[in-house]
Image: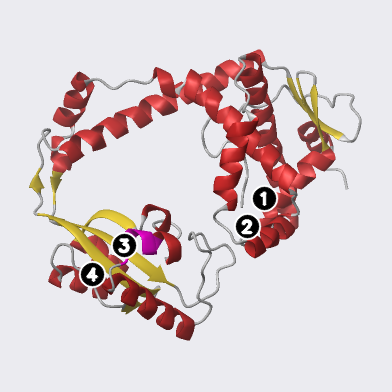
Amino acid sequence: MKLLLFAGLLAGLLVTASCSSPSTANADVVAKVDETEITAPQLEKQFQSRVNGSDQPPAPEEMDDLKLQVLTQMINDQILLKMANDSGLNATDAEVDVKFNEFKSQYTNEKFNELLSQQKMTVDEIRAELRKSITIDKLVNKEITSKISVTEGEIKDFYDKNKDSFNLPESYHVAHILVTPVADPQITNAKNDDAKSADQARMKAAQLLRQIQGGADFAAVARDYSEDPASAPNGGDLQFQPLQALDSLDPKLAQAVQRMRVGETSPVIETKYGFHIVKLLEKDAGGQKDLGDPRVQAQVRQVIFNRKDQTLKNAFSEMARNKAKVTNYLAERIFSNAGKS
């Protein structure tokens, strides 16, 4: 679990004041945002959370850079939390309760306790991180998301300028369930169910197929048991894929999908990734798609929305930085120690 608050919401860095000479500060203080101090223990806790969630520990020469990245994130969050507080947008206890229960419901009690131990966090600390995240989300929704609109004229103009990109190949709307033959300590399906060997994976895939053939909902089974972190939360949905894309994953998948009828579920397919069960949801003959196609409209609308969203976030970042008084003592200390043995 990586409870880093911004979660990619603001691309601009709310960076710090000049580092021309080290400022006077207690060695335990690594940064100051207006009157709020960020301490070394607070930074270390966030840093360890980042390290614990990574596949490989950072090399010694990477430590300072990674700590600066984590500290910058903490500074960003503090700036936004202050803005949210000034606007009366703090998360309520009820909102935190809902998010906490949603988060905890992904784990059994045993797995949840293992997570707390691994991340060296308490329930209160998780709730505090969730409170910050909800508060920042409320600020972003109020100041950015609510101000974005996409007009029909903008959609038509974008389509007319990019019409060739909507001349599409034949494609297949597929969903899949993947069971991998290796253990994954950070499994993300709803049941936290993970096959740990090839034999276990083969047996699990066969059992899931029997459930589906017996009438179980494919999407529900995928959410509960699929070991593909990208698609499991969406019921295994891979959206529309051209045959070439499926073939590049594994020719066996492409061959199976080509033979299937809409609504049909495949037998277990073994590939280099593990064991798949595939369902064909729709077929699209391809060709030039016009603006009357609801999927084209939705795609264009999303592209325009994302562009406006990013522009407003960049502008908002600059405004937030302008209003805040920030000193990054850690950056100053690292810079002043450069070249010293």
The residue identified by callout 2 is 54
Mark 2 to mark 3 CA distance (whole Å): 34 Å
Mark drawn on residue 217: 3
Mark drawn on residue 265: 4
Total numbered labels placed on residues in the image: 4
Please tell me whether mark 4 sits on a helix, a strand or a loop.
loop
Q: Is residue 49 above or below residue 293?
A: below
Q: 207 or 136: nearer the eye?
A: 207
Which of marks 1 and 3 precedes in the sequence? 1
Side of 188 relative to 39 (left or right): left
Side of 316 relative to 86 (left or right): left
Which is closer to the viewer, label 2 or label 3? 3
Q: Magenta region: which residues? A: 216-222
Given the image, on which type of amino acid does mark 3 rest? Asp
The residue identified by callout 1 is 50
Q: Residues within 10 Å of mark 1 (few under 14, many from 20)?
A: some
- The residue at the point 53 percent across, 78 percent down is 196
